Image: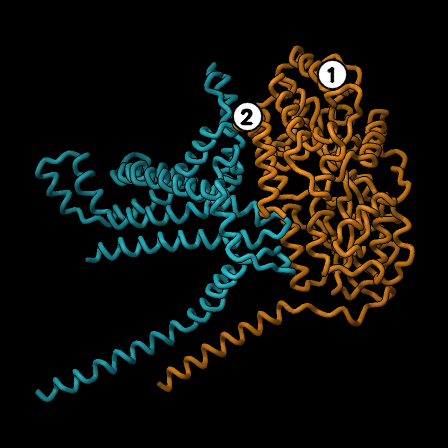
Amino acid sequence: MPTTAPRLASRPRRKRSNWRSALVFLLPLVVIYAVYFAYSIVFLAQTSFTKVSLTFFNSIDVGWRNYELLLSDPVFTRAILNNLLFAVISIAAALTIAFFIAVALSAGVRAGRLFYLIFLLPALMPVSLVATIFGSMLQERYGVFNETLRAIGLDALALPWLTEPGLAFGVVAVIFVYLIGLPIMYYTADLSALPTESIESALIDGAGTFRIMRSIVFPMMRSTHVTIILSLLLLSFRALEVVLFSTRGGPNQSTEIVGSYVYGFATSAGPTIGLVSAASIIVLLIALILSLVQMYVLREKKK
Amino acid sequence: MKIQRRLLAAFGAAAASALVLAGCSAAQPGAGDQVALDAKQEISLWGWSGAPGTENIQRVIDAFEEIHPNITVNYTEVLNTDYKNKATLALGAGEPIDVIGVQANAWATENQNFFLPVSDWPDSDGITDAYEPAVLAQNEKLFSDDVLRSVPFGSSGSAIGYYNIDLLEAAGLTEYPRTWDDFKKLADGLKAVDPEAVAAVMPADTWFQDEFLLTLAGQIDPEFFNGVRYDGAKWDDPTYVKALENYKSLYDDGILDSSTLDLGYVDAMALFDQGKAAVVFNGTWEAGRLAQSFRDTNKLVPSDVGIMPVPTFDDSEDGSLRSFLDLTYGIPTASKHQAAAVEFIKFATAGDGVAEWATGFAFVPAVKGFALPDGVLTTDLETEGYATLQSLVANPHSDRNNLSNFSAQVGKYILSVVSGEMTPQEAATQGQADLESGKYN
């Protein structure tokens, strides 16, 4: 009896003490965050209401004009849509092709490590290099791909891959799919840590390989799927090099993404920094919404 | 509570320190305590790639340092596509730059507060007398307050054609094609003897598509571009629509090959250099190909190269182009080596340094009465080509004073017209809408 009361009284004190210790350790990070991140965002938001060049001389307050320009610009809205479409394609490829490859590699196929390296390699190479090689290979008249097709008599298939909008969109989509090495790595790592009891039970019950994959392995890797989906979704907004070095956003801006749209204005002379800032704020809000979705999904999982 | 207050105080102090540090780094150093011309010193020169190129400017620096052994010139070359941003940030941060390459476009106006007026340069009396008056007049247009803040270095023009005499002769031509009808003969003749080769290539980069289209527009109405650039004339003028129609017809009639419209700048030049294209359209800055020494060093296939204007649709017209001052040299107000900077600028733009870089053909020099040193050009074709280039740059139909991002944007519409996704009228109307939108100027 005498020991219970003092123990209860000490808990809030210890909690407060823990909270203070945590604050002391977090403080340097908070300061860095406040100075660099928060300041940058506030600065970006302020600049987005101005018309100004990179010199920041003669800044003119234009209110919501930059946002109006962007939201009424079909190219900008198409760029956002393209971003999401490329993300969806990338995610679909990750959840199917990457998952299948990871399972196949984990199942002990011959030369598994070699295949693992082959599939992972594109993701380890600079994206700009990968996109440049694709762009060069797919040139209509002198590209290696079309020259090969012509050499084997398939002239009809030697198409204008980079100058026809539908084909160019497909080319960018293929590059996104080509870069699914990281999802393969995530799946491979998760598969090796998967508890095997359920699979063994299913095998004893006579379940086939496809059934085991569909009903046991795939659902058990839910957290990996969520991580992959959200990381690919957010990464698509940073995939500037994929577009810039393959199609340059063309033809007729059909493959433009937000990154390439912003890049065009940010690297030009003229008072475009306000517009670029406004575009960045819009992208930031979209990323924020995606992050909130992520938090919501993970919270549901905990419940 | 005590700890919380201390934490808050620490947080506040850190934030204040960060702001003070940030403020200090943004402050510009003063230009007091100028270093005398005869003192031992190092000066910093900034320029962008191709203006006039590292090797060319290094020859100028070497020659200058030989005359002025007390002055060392440190050259920083920034990639041309990054220059606008990097140079602006460097000037804003007060980096010690003494001579800066000033781009002859909207960038000069936006940054004019960083440059010392030429009238305030030490020992600069009569400096402007050395330059061609027309080029100096272009230089003055760059600054909104009519105060000259840089001096001209060299000019360039676009578009022109470089032709491979071997392929022209193989196609049965004895002289370069002056009209597009003549060019059709080149295309047909070449197809008959060498199906792998193409009559012409050009960079499909959108900014160059705009350059080429404006060259065609200038053939129809020489006042078109200057009217838009300086006098508020309309982009969707019938002249521009007609130029788009003409350009599309070149592809529809098989004079130009639409399968080359995915070639980037480097690829287009490489095809010409490898002898796979009879003509490459580009700007005057690629004129190094005229020199045998350049062709030998870079192992170019054409045995001889000539220069031609962009062909015309009407055989009664002469070809022309847009040209403008490309590079000018200024002195940042923060420079502490202004006397040495002026000395270097005089040497490089109007003195013995001109011959050092002009042989690289990046620009046509702005100095009065310049002629290339003997022996640089060795064949008649090369000599005639350079004379054509000088004449075209000196007599443009309009100024090549571009709005860079607008140029890149309308270039996309031009490609869409060629592929049939837009009509010429739609492309012109969209260009006008973009111009009025406020996004590009």
Q: Residue at x 55, y 29 (%)?
A: B416
Mark 1 highlights which residue?
Answer: B182
* Image disc number at residue B419: 2
Q: Secondary structure at mark 1?
A: helix
Q: Residue at x 66, y 26 (%)?
A: B242
* Amino acid at circle 2: Ser
Q: Residue at x 85, y 43 (%)?
A: B134
Foreground pick, B415 / B155: B415
* Amino acid at circle 1: Asp
Q: Left of B433 or right of it: where is B141?
A: right
Q: Left of A24 or right of it: where is B82?
A: right
Foreground pick, A274 / B81: A274
**In the figure, residue B175 lies in which quadrant?**
top right
> Which colour denotes chain B?
orange
For disc 1, the chain is: B
State the cyan chain. Answer: A
Q: What colour scheme has been applied to the protein in the rendered image?
A: by chain
Point out residue B141 in the picture as x, y percentages from the top left corner.
78, 49
**In the figure, residue A170 lies in which quadrant?**
top left
Foreground pick, B91 / B211: B211
Of circles 2 and 1, the one toward us is 2
N-terminal label among 2 and 1:
1
